[in-house]
Image (cartoon, grey):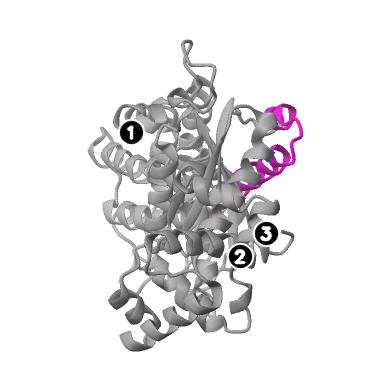
Amino acid sequence: MDDTGMDDAGGTAGTTAGGAPVPESGATAGGAEVRSPEGRFTAAPGLAAVLLPRMAEMAAETASRLTADIPAYRLLPDSVLGGDLVANTEAVLKLFFTTVAEGRAPTEAELAAPVAWGAERARDGVPLEAVLRVYPLGARRAWELAAAGPDPVADPYALVTGLLAFLGEVMPKVAEAYLREQADLDWEQREHGRNLAGVLLAGRPARRAAERYGRTLAERYEVVVLRLPEAPGGATNRILRALRSELDGNPEVLATFKGEGGVLLVPLGPLGPHAPADPTGPAAAPDGATRRLLARLDTAAALRCTAAAAVAEDHGSIPRAQAEASEVLSLAEDLGRPPGLYRLADLAVEYQLVQPGPARDALARVLAPLEDQPHLIATLREFIAAGYRRADAAEALTVHRNTLTYRLGRIRLLTGHDATDPTGARHLAAALTAYGAARRPGA
């Protein structure tokens, strides 16, 4: 060796033939380096020679244990279990022992195949936890065979530190790829559902599109028109994300959102063979799926939404059901009803009152004298909403009870109907409903 620190082979003093620095303590008895400059990878050249011939055996054992211990793998097709799973496991084990023997991290190119394999499992429906368990299980088996076999490795420390460093490199990348694939898959499913919902709501045939997306359509749907409550700042976007996340777990529900509302198509079971001819009879009633779904959406959004629903007995009647549900929802909002789910039966009288015609116009004209005094209309609305209880209405209006009494007297004087009298109260309530409907845009 000359003064420049170069040996006869052209290597740097204090390095291995491969160029990796040797620590001051030198090599172990087995010829393995103790630690890399990063303190993460150690080199054990004898590992590959000893264990690479046993890769097929180790891969088969690991795959067998995976299918025995993790139910999700037993649901995979045989082509994946007997082919891809074993092949991927063997490739990962080979990569591990090769990189440990050389004391280096795996390259991006070397990790591409196992990372892609893990991402593909997202489309098979294998949970991320099950995908990642391949690696510690394979590492454990590698340790067992390497440390307890007939020819144990010379440096167990190199193997253990190599295992940990390798898992630290591979598992995060697999998890990242899996989650990215899962997000893409969720987006695709959401878009498919939105597209199918749009086709059905437009009254167009959707079966061919459903087949193209790999989706199965129900014969009957309950059409749910949903309105989100007002939320401060950017809370509306948070609420929408929470709702979409919940709906991602219910792929059979088709959904489309726009602005602060949306439309859900909730599948219903078919009518029984002895169902009555009347489509509004008990056999046609929803099975509770809608209420359960909305309860979960309320929980996800951390608030209560207002929604209305109508049953579509076939795909052709979905637009009609949407129109009915939209009308019921608008009516519930006009009447100041609390958040919840409403159907036509819940507001049948009010629904009939708001249908265009001479009767609605006559009722709406009852409140014409109050048009230039909106505080009187607000007073009448709160008095009715409070169940005609003066104290509750005054509290809701934040006025004194005497002020409320004075306003009710003004309403009686201007309209000719007394809101405190049962007959007058019914007439004014009907008039208020017709008045709101007549002033709705497009009425």
Residue labelled with disc 3: 361
Could you tell me which residue is drawn at 37 percent across and 86 percent down? 398
Task: Write down the quadrant of residue 223 in the picture.
Answer: top right
From the viewer's perspective, tell me whether residue 216 is left or right of residue 140: right
From the viewer's perspective, tell me whether residue 63 is left or right of residue 411: left
- Label 3 sits on what residue type? Asp
Q: Position of residue 358 (x, y in %)?
A: 70, 53
Residue count near mark 3 (Cα–Cα under 10 Å), binned few <14, some 14–19, many ≥20: some
On the question of residue 281 being in view, the answer is: yes
Q: Which mark is residue 47?
A: none
Among numbered discs 3 and 2, the one appearing first in the sequence = 3
- Label 2 sits on what residue type? Tyr
Residue labelled with disc 1: 70
Residue count near mark 1 (Cα–Cα under 10 Å), binned few <14, some 14–19, many ≥20: some
Nearer to me, 35 or 232: 232
Among numbered discs 3 and 1, the one appearing first in the sequence = 1
Q: CA distance from mark 3 to mark 2?
A: 8 Å
Residue labelled with disc 2: 435
Could you tell me which residue is drawn at 50 percent across and 64 percent down? 428
Q: CA distance from mark 2 to mark 1?
A: 63 Å
- Label 1 sits on what residue type? Ile
In this rendering, the label closer to the viewer, 2 or 1: 2
Nearer to me, 199 or 398: 398
